[in-house]
Amino acid sequence: MVAPALVGRVGELAALTAAVSAPPSVVTVVGEAGVGKTRLVSELLRLPELTGRRVLVGRCHPIREAFPLGPIVEALAGVGDQVHGLGLSEVAGAVRPLLPELAPWLPPAPEPLDDRASQRHRVFRGLVDVLGALSPVVLVVEDLHWVDEQTSDFLAYLLAVSPPGLTAVVTYRGEQAGPHLRAVPATLPAGTTRAHVALAPLSEAETGALAAGILGTDGVSQQFARHLWERTSGLPFAVEEVLALVRERGLLVQRGDRWARRALDRLEVPRGIRESTLERVLRLSTAARRIAEAAAVLQAPVGLSVLAAVTGGEGLVEALEEAIGHGVLVETDGAFGFRHALAAQAVYESLSTPRRTALHGRAATALGALSPPPLGRIAHHQRQADELAPWAVTAEAAADQAVQLADDAEAVRLLADVLRHAPLDARQRGRIAVKLGWAAIHALRAEEALELLPAAIGEDLPPPVRGEIRLLVSLLLNETGGDPQAERRLLVEAAADLDDRPDLQALTMVALGVPSTPGVPIAEHLMWTARALALATEVDDRLVEAHILGKAGMVLVSVGEPSWRDLADRLQRLTAGTPRQRREANAYLSIGWEACLAGHLDVAGSLLAAGLRSAAAQENRRLELGFRSAQVFLAFCRGQWDGLAQEVALLVEQLSDYPRFRIDVDVVAGCLALAHGELDQARQRLADASQLAERLGDLPVLPAAVDAATRAALAQGDVEAAVAGVRRCRSLLTAKDTPVPLARLLPAAVEALVAAGEPDEADDLVRLVTEELRDRDVPLLPAALHYARGILAADADALLLAAEEYRRVGAGHEAVRARERAAGLLLDAGDERGVPLLREAVRAYEALGATWDLNRALGLARRYGVGLPARHRGGRRGYGAALSPRERQVAELAATGRTNKEIAEALVLSATTVEKHLGAVMRKLSIRSRTELARLMAVGTSKDGGFPS
């Protein structure tokens, strides 16, 4: 019995109506089970305000299927040729595997990406493109409390984008909503209308009105309404179920146009839903009752063939009609099931264990006959039927399907459950452990996999399988910041096991080549690197080869081995100069970043620029942040400081979850603070960055932090701290047998030791660096040695040679500091050659915005009476009417039709920053709309395809 009209929800419906009438909008309806969420949404969708909009409905189910984004797929699967001719972009082709029903009208599938996160993000973009093309559209997702992780992530992405014609309506039970679910609608872009309705149970009066509507009368007595309200707690579904039962009992009488209880003491209305549902089912015939029991076990609505297979099929049609006629079951689009999950749960819990187990077994068999088989549901029923061996097989197949569709989190859940509970032989356990390990890496679920994989190593496994598990455990330990010694032991053992797997053996060996474990001689790392490179020629996998070249090249750069250039050339030939996959881009980052640290700034710039373009095209946020962090460091080294402080501040916010990348940005932030004269802040930031670098074993970046911290300490007269920092850094690098970074440390180290009255120690350090780095490819070495000798001997000519060497390698700031130091020595000796050098330093510091260095140079000029031309005093120089580089980037993307949100994602900026840049662009170009901007790009661009500067 269902009320013909909605009762007691006038205000709630008005709030939802106002929201859906002003898209883009988001509507959330929350309330306990049976409170009327679905009914409210159904009334909303029937309103005339929604005329002309497509309505798409998907539901989350308690039994999870190994198919990602199920509710979204369910909502879109029926749109068919409605997407024909809607001008879908190429990215919409990424949804083909999810929506084969739409394949005739979708663009071709793009080339797959080797990064699951990027692939998933591209699918998200494709779905948003389809939904945007279908707009104006209302997307309803019911029962979000059962949502899978990927659907939750997609909804968060969709709502953050909020296409202009979209209204999203979601319902869920508040008591079952975790933080992840509550965060889905939390962040909405400006201009998005939002309505949140929390449904409460009906009042006593509303319960009476609902009862009257169900019974088809003008009203019921107040006493009846109160008794019904007390028994049902005002839950609409409970009211409907109870009234259906008491009417079947014949306990209601009609007096004129009103209904009343026959007698209060005789009307024993059951409390809540469970008792009323069970009594109604018991009143059915045996055949109809069996169908209800089967539907309760199946949980999700199913077709006639499945019900027949589970119940035996005799008298099925008549029994099904009886169950539907009594309102126990309902039909929806040819599928049969309970109208509400609470009713199904009540019947399910009433079944005896043997009966329940038998029905689960039949359900698994019946569902297995479908094509394609719903693997997740089959696995659930096999598990509940205690058929553990078949369950393990089905669950593994379901996990394989999830991996193919980039739902690695679901694969981890399934495989971990099988490893914990299924009766597996060693061969099965090894195979499933390997699958779990790779899925956990892709899904970032290391902790769960680490609970199970180490035990699998002790099984009687073939060496290649055991070796792969050891490799996986090592990678997972690395991901969680585990013991580096344990990681290394596992890698060494894996290398011995993997003779029959050259691809995995090469990956293992190149990991052993990376100098990240304390106490391991660099010669051993180089041995493993050489073995990995030798194996790379046997590997018929371009992505594995790129990974090996990247890691091996990184190691060789770090030790000053010139052959790294050959590996960089091989990598660029392998990728035709354009990395298109994650591993290829990662290889560019590995070599490019290490080249930047070692002073190969031009090569670093080329590799990092190509890699950043690739990371942005793949929409790989982690990789893009890595490249941007490296480019920030590169820009600082090159003296390209315009806009650098703003980019650093933005990255500091975005890198909270990426500590290794954060180190580089924090070092630059500290160096900029020093250059701006904020010495205390600089020392603190540099000290924090140094501690993090030590903790994570990222020693190559440490000298840059110590160099700046030493100069700050010396400026404040804290010679003791300066020397202590230098000595600790030297000790760490020497213990690790990695002397190349000493070239960056040497100038500041010598200044500190000389200031401390330790010239002999400084001289020893110069000799050590000279001997250790002789014949190595270290671009900073000649400049560092000239600078150190210039300080030790107070030799201006040596400092000028240092300045020229720094200029040659592109280290602009260091070159200016060397010239300033030489100018001071010359002026002190009365040599007029110091005058133009000092003037040049002042101009360079002013151009950089290095106020601390500038004030120091100005003080030197005053001391020696050096006249200087009038200086710009208006703050940082701007671009006037011309577009800055960042404004140009924003303008070019906006002209292609991208939204502020899409531009923000592409450039890794905030939407607010994009809005600010776009306003500046329109003001400078004297235009008022994006249409004019696109027209300007088409007819008024400069020769290089950019906007006029």
Image (tube, helix red, strand yellow):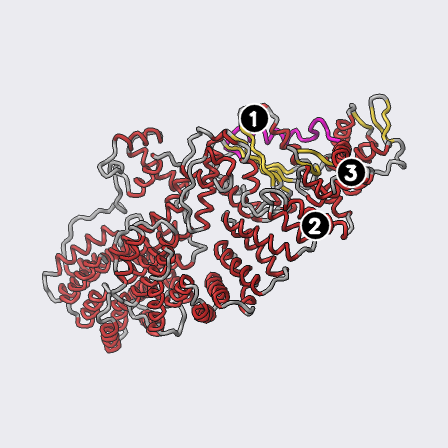
Sequence-wise, the earlier of marks 3 and 1 is 1
Q: Is residue 75 left or right of residue 306?
A: left
Q: Is residue 865 left or right of residue 769?
A: left
Relative depth, front residue between 187 and 944: 944
Q: Is residue 192 left or right of residue 41?
A: left
Q: Secondary structure at mark 1?
A: helix
Residue type of the residue flagged with mark 3? Ala
Task: Assign the N terminus to one quadrant of the image.
Answer: top right
Task: Assign the C terminus to one quadrant of the image.
Answer: top left
Residue type of the residue flagged with mark 2? Gly
In the rendered structure, does residue 288 fall within the stretch colored magenta? no
Question: On the image, which quarter does residue 761 sit in?
Answer: bottom left
Residue 686 picture location, percent across and down: 36, 62
Residue 561 picture location, percent across and down: 27, 67
Relative depth, front residue between 489 and 19: 489
Q: Which residues, given as a range, are shown in magenta?
A: 1-26
Instruction: Determine crowd level at label 1: few under 14, some 14-19, many 20+ residues with C-alpha closer than 10 A.
Output: some
Q: Name the residue that disc number 2 marks.
A: 361
Residue 859 visible in the picture: no
Q: Is residue 162 above or below residue 837?
A: above
Instruction: List the single residue furthest toward the bottom.
Output: 760
Sequence-wise, the earlier of marks 2 and 1 is 1
Q: CA distance from mark 2 to mark 3?
A: 20 Å
Q: Name the residue that disc number 3 marks.
A: 288
